Image (cartoon, helix red, strand yellow):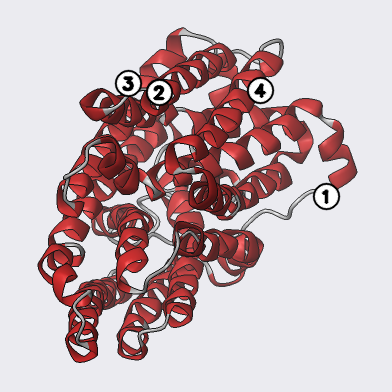
């Protein structure tokens, strides 16, 4: 989802030769793509962990995503303002500081053993990630020649995808690994034994996030001692007209489609582990987490191959086709069982791959002279990740997980309709450039 933030502001280009170590700065900033992908995808592991350890319903556990994505809505504009006031480097350092502070917050949260304390820590982490996504995306695009901007973004996104693939592996190995060993103790008649098992479970979460906090501290130090290319002042923004912006019907449709798509993406992965265990009884949490990692690999693979597709096929057409394939594979996952059901659900990730950047590109293009504020509004639609997962979670609690996944069919159908609606607008090449 990081593609969106690169267009929120339009500063003058920053030349690699304008002072500073460009290569070192580029490597550091690229590593941030990995870091926020880790945080996003560890949430899917936390949902399963807290369902069991803190005895939460699926609906209650989904507030992990609600808390995380509300931060996008709250901090998107303030983070952009911070970038204009203190610059890209200091905004990234601010983001890392908030990220690290939130990770440290997992220590007292685990000691208290309350869900609310974990949610506060996650909100702080997410507020830092908003700063990172906006400032890092701007740096990658604006530092260096415009001719190589696409290469730089693709390289950075590769690390974002790497983080998405590795996060479930780390979660499965360090957060969920103790789950299978202590479940019996947790349900044992002895309250003392149950409390001890719960403490062990929360210690696994505590330790993982303390290690993440250590990594953020190292990155802050490295960023502080690395001389970045000199930044130029941002150009003054044009007058903003929300009424003019929302008169553009394709833009308004893009905002709706993006809200529902982000919600569907988050929901697919949030309850992936539960879905796999339902489809394949006897599957352990760790095994399901590794399958989630494989699903995220397909998503990353789809982003690279999808970039080739939208060069050959008009973007709205490609979006409609991928949306239709997501609907078909989602139906296959719900209506089948066993390995076929799991493979269909994993395929949904492949077809989701091009949706966010394509919807974003079509929406910003449709915004025309209000493109800058249009980009900001589209970033704020990421709050869809706080709306759809709890709806699916509550539906799962009352009607069953498989039936609840049909909610996502409606979300992907809107993506298909948007692709068809936007088709008369721009070509793929025109939209994405």
Residue 263 x/y as whole percent: 55, 44
Residue, disc 4 = 418
Query: Marks 1 and 2: which is nearer the front?
Result: 2
Of tags 2 and 3, the one toward the viewer is 2
Secondary element under disc 4, as helix, strand or loop, is helix
Q: Is residue 291 above or below residue 90?
A: above
The span from disc 4 to disc 1 (Cα, nearest Å) is 25 Å
- Mark 4 vs mark 1: which is more N-terminal? 1
Local secondary structure at mark 2:
helix
Q: CA distance from mark 3 to mark 1?
A: 36 Å
Q: Residue at x 71, y 16 (%)?
A: 421
Kind of element beneath mark 1: loop
Residue at horizontal 33%, vertical 33%? 299
Left or right of residue 188, residue 26 in this image: right
Looking at the image, tell me whether mark 2 or mark 4 is earlier in sequence order: 2
Please rate how many residues cluster around mark 3, counting C-alpha atoms within 10 Å: few if below 14, some from 14 to 19, many from 20: few
Q: Position of residue 59 (x, y in %)?
A: 51, 58
**Does label 3 or label 4 sit earlier along the sequence?**
3
Percent coordinates x, y for residue 305 in the rendering? 32, 21
Q: Which mark is residue 257?
A: none
Extreme residue in the left direction: 181
Residue 335's disc number: 2
User: Could you tell me residue 203's position as x and y percent?
Assistant: 21, 80
Report the residue marked by disc 1: 240
> What is the spatial separation of the Cα atoms under label 1 and label 2, in whole angstroms?
48 Å
Badge 3 element:
helix
**Residue at label 3?**
305
Which numbered disc, 4 or 1, marks the residue closer to the eye? 4
């Amino acid at each position: 989802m990081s593609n969106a933030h690169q267009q929120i502001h339009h500063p003058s280009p920053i030349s690699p030769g304008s002072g500073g170590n460009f290569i070192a700065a580029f490597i550091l900033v690229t590593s941030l793509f990995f870091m926020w992908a880790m945080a996003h995808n560890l949430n899917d592991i936390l949902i399963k962990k807290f369902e069991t350890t803190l005895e939460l319903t699926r609906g209650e556990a989904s507030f992990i995503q609600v808390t995380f994505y509300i931060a996008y809505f709250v901090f998107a504009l303030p983070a952009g303002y911070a970038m204009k006031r203190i610059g890209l480097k200091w905004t990234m350092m601010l983001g890392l500081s908030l990220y690290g502070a939130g990770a440290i917050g997992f220590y007292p949260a685990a000691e208290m053993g309350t869900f609310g304390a974990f949610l506060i820590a996650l909100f702080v982490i997410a507020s830092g990630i908003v700063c990172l996504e906006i400032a890092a995306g701007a740096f990658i695009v604006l530092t260096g020649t415009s001719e190589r901007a696409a290469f730089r973004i693709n390289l950075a996104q590769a690390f974002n995808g790497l983080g998405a693939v590795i996060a479930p592996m780390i979660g499965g190995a360090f957060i969920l690994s103790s789950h299978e060993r202590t479940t019996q103790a947790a349900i044992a008649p002895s309250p003392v034994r149950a409390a001890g098992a719960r403490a062990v479970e929360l210690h696994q979460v505590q330790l993982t996030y303390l290690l993440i906090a250590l990594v953020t501290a190292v990155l802050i130090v490295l960023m502080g001692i690395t001389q970045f290319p000199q930044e130029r002042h941002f150009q003054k923004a044009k007058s903003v007209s929300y009424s003019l912006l929302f008169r553009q019907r394709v833009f308004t449709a893009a905002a709706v489609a993006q809200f529902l798509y982000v919600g569907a993406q988050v929901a697919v992965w949030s309850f992936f582990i539960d879905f796999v265990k339902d489809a394949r009884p006897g599957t352990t949490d760790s095994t399901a987490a590794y399958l989630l990692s494989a699903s995220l690999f397909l998503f990353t693979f789809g982003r690279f191959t999808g970039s080739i597709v939208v060069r050959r096929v008009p973007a709205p057409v490609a979006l409609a086709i991928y949306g239709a394939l997501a609907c078909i594979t989602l139906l296959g996952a719900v209506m089948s069982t066993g390995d076929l059901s799991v493979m269909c659900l994993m395929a949904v990730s492949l077809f989701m791959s091009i949706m966010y950047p394509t919807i974003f590109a079509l929406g910003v293009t449709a915004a025309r002279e209000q493109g800058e504020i249009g980009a900001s509004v589209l970033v704020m639609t990421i709050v869809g990740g706080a709306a759809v997962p709890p709806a699916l979670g509550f539906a799962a609690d009352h009607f069953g997980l498989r039936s609840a996944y049909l909610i996502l069919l409606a979300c992907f159908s809107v993506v298909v309709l948007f692709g068809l609606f936007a088709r008369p607008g721009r070509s793929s090449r025109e939209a994405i450039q």
